[in-house]
Amino acid sequence: MYNAVIFDLDGTLTDSGEGIFNCVRYTLDKMNRPQLDDATLRRFIGPPLAESFMNYCGMDEDTAREATRFYRERYVPIGWKENTVYPGIRALLRHLKKQGVYLAVATGKPQTTAQTVLDYFGLSEYMDQIAGPMAGELHANKADLIRRVLPDNCKALMVGDTAGDVKGGHDTGIDSAAALWGYGTEESLLNAKPTHVCKTVSDLMTLLGCPQEKGLFITFEGVDGCGKTTQMNLLEKQLIHFGYPVYRTREPGGCPIAEDIRKIVLSQEDGGMCSETEALLFAAARAQHVKQVILPKTKEGHTVICDRFVDSSLVYQGMGRELSMDWVKLINRIAFESGAPDMTVLLRLPREESLRRRNASSTPDRIEKAGDAFFARTEKGFDQLAAENPDRIIPVDAHGTPDEVAERVWQAVWAKLKEAALS
């Protein structure tokens, strides 16, 4: 077992291609130089930037300095955020840190920029040291960077996605793991003769003895038209950006049997359906959904985001239809016993505004035609549940632009991830 692991950054911990490619294109456009093909652009990931401009654009050192200034003109405000943590990396670092393994980064990216990226994604807290080219340093040999962070008397592993990373391991006398999920070619990596070859982050986790972690189950609730779909879309994007595997689902629905039930309970015609039947159908769909989708996906490590769950039954059937709350809880016991959410985001918007939005966007379904008295009870019901379950249900103000609301949602979710030691 290794007691020190050193990582490259771009192409190993994060997928930084989009931002780097966009900034190189911006630079070449500003300098009136020909654009590069995709294969050449990929070579910019890993080595120091000025070296790449000299090697792949035929620039001398002074011109490469100028190109670096143009590159950073876009990279500093925009480019560094065009980046995504690879799925599984966060769990890997968290496990290694818990085991007392020394962790470091040795990257061709400027050290201050690398620190900014790692801080933004919440990864710097796992790192004992970070090494990259310092201000004004155009050239930085990977082996020299590794030596800056390599502790004495340890069994160390260098993990990287390029042949230069593997060579850096050889030159410093430590083992190496070729990360085939990054930007280096498999041929060049294998020719460099790494100690280990990992096709996926999961392979690296297995190599380092990291177990699979259970994912978080997050539900979204609120009166119809409060913006759940928009906010779920934005949260999914942000979670993926931060390296969390995400699985999206909905209720009623989420699996074939539950989707068939959805067609019945949300049809525009009620067919004389009584409130008890409606509640039982929702509970049946949920039981199948929990067993077939939610539990397996969270066990696999996915963060599951679900549009509505058992709180909706308590509010719509229990309070809205005025059924016995104890009975509604009884028929949904599988959700309470084995599929309870870790966190529920309650988007709060007055029912008048939310229903205006909902009716303007599509034809109301059977439940949405229930009338104002029904929705007054559901609005009150969600507030009551939030008051009764403050540790799980987090009310979020849904007024404002989608991005403003999304920032409130993200802050709430990020706090929950930290509380659950999953950040």
Image (cartoon, rainbow, N blue to C red):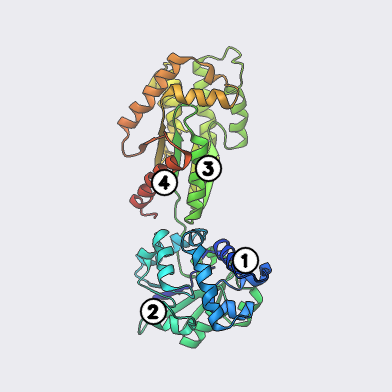
Say if residue 47 shows up in the picture. Answer: no
Query: Could you tell me residue 239's position as x and y percent?
Result: 48, 51
- How crowded is the residue under tag 1: few (<14 C-alpha within 10 Å), some, or many (20+)? few
Q: Nearer the viewer, residue 306 or 223?
A: 223
- The CA distance from mark 2 to mark 4 is 33 Å
Q: Quadrant of residue 218?
A: top left
Q: Which residue is mark 3?
A: 233
Mark 2 or mark 4, which has the lower sequence index? Answer: 2
Say if residue 337 shows up in the picture. Answer: yes
Q: Which residue is mark 4?
A: 410
Q: Nearer the viewer, residue 390 or 264?
A: 390
Under mark 4, the amino acid is: Trp
Under mark 2, the amino acid is: Val
Mark 2 or mark 3, which has the lower sequence index? Answer: 2
Query: Could you tell me residue 413's position as x and y percent?
Result: 40, 46
Of tags 1 and 4, the one toward the viewer is: 1
Q: Is residue 157 above or below residue 403?
A: below
- The CA distance from mark 2 to mark 1 is 37 Å
Q: Which residue is mark 2?
A: 149
Determine which of the numbered discs, if any, sits on residue 321 in the image: none
